[in-house]
Amino acid sequence: MPAPPAKSESANYFGRLLTLVWLSLAQLVRAPSHSRRAEAARRSARHVLLLVVIVGAVIITLMYAVDVAEISLMPPRGTPGLWWVKILTDFGKDEYVLSALGVLLIVVALTAPALRGVPRATLLGLGTRLQYLFLSVALSVAVGEVIKWIVGRGRPFVGGKANAFNFQHFAGTEAYSSFPSGHSITAFALAFAVSAVWPRARVAMLVYALIIIATRLVLLAHHPSDVVAGALVGVIGAMAVRYWFAARRLGFAIDRDGTVVALPGPSEERLKRVAGSAFAP
């Protein structure tokens, strides 16, 4: 007699799981509904234009005045004492960051169908914010890969000498994929996204992003202009995804002047209570 109820509960769980996944995807692609999305779009466009102009000027200046001098000061590739820098730099690798965020999303998706009421809503709120983080990094990295392929800038000392203008456009090889820095894109997209959702983490995330770009320079993986360009791509990518979410009232709202603001999210205490109830025997 116990078998039929168990099967029924299992079927109900998987039914709720499939419904949850479907609704999560549907809300991401539904038509925008926020009444002030046009104001937010104009404000975001102004900020992006300003960023591109200012940071673009910095990138050009670095190419002409700093890149060669900076890479000439770095220790040679393969220096044994840099093993700890190689470990640090992996915290900005897009495969690792996206995998970690993906695992968290899967955990939320698998746990939420077993909950009800406030605990379920709390966990789904966290899931929406994790979706924002994941898509911010994924979009930024994808755009960065296209730019790398088009620009085809040689990494430091590729070709045998320090040359900031060593290009093979559309080369598609690792040696000529220096601009922009993929680690910098990942670090700054994640830093911006986390700071947008949890403003108190802003300083910690900025320190994280700066450490990642410093490791790329020390390891002679990139020129200074490469990491600055990566930061620009990462920030703009995260801004674009934030606007997409705000226009659909997902985790963000839009003020009257077009400012995108984070909606109150699940507190740490509430998440601990939800975790306790989800994994309690």
Image: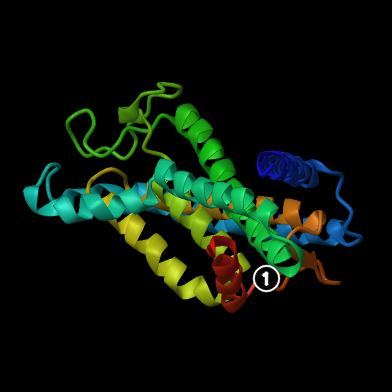
Drawn side of residue 183 relative to residue 36, left or right: left
Residue 194 position (above or below residue 137): below
Up the image or down, 177 lies above or below 266; here it is above
267 lies left or right of 247: left
Colour pattern of the rendering: rainbow
Say which of 210 and 223 sits in front: 210
Residue 206, position in %: x, y?
Answer: 44, 67
The quarter of the image holding the N terminus is: top right
Q: Which residue appears farthest toward the top when viewing the image?
A: 171
Describe the element under mark 1 as helix, strand or loop.
loop
Q: Is residue 94 above or below residue 170?
A: below
Q: Residue at x 58, y 54 (%)?
A: 133
Numbered marks: total? 1
Report the residue at 47% width, 54% height from top: 231
Using a 10 Å C-alpha cutoff, classify the residue at mark 1 as few (fewer than 14 neighbours), some (14 to 19) or many (20 or more).
some
| Residue 192 picture location, percent across and down | 55, 61
User: Where, by quadrant of the figure, is residue 127 drawn?
Assistant: bottom right
Residue 70 in sight from this viewpoint: no
At 24% from the left and 52% from the top, the residue drawn is 87
The residue at 56%/66% (across/down) is 275
Furthest-left residue in this view: 80
Image quarter of residue 200: bottom right
Q: Which percent across, then down, holds residue 146?
A: 52, 31
Location of mark 1 (residue): 265
Camera sees residue 173: yes
The amino acid marked with disc number 1 is Gly
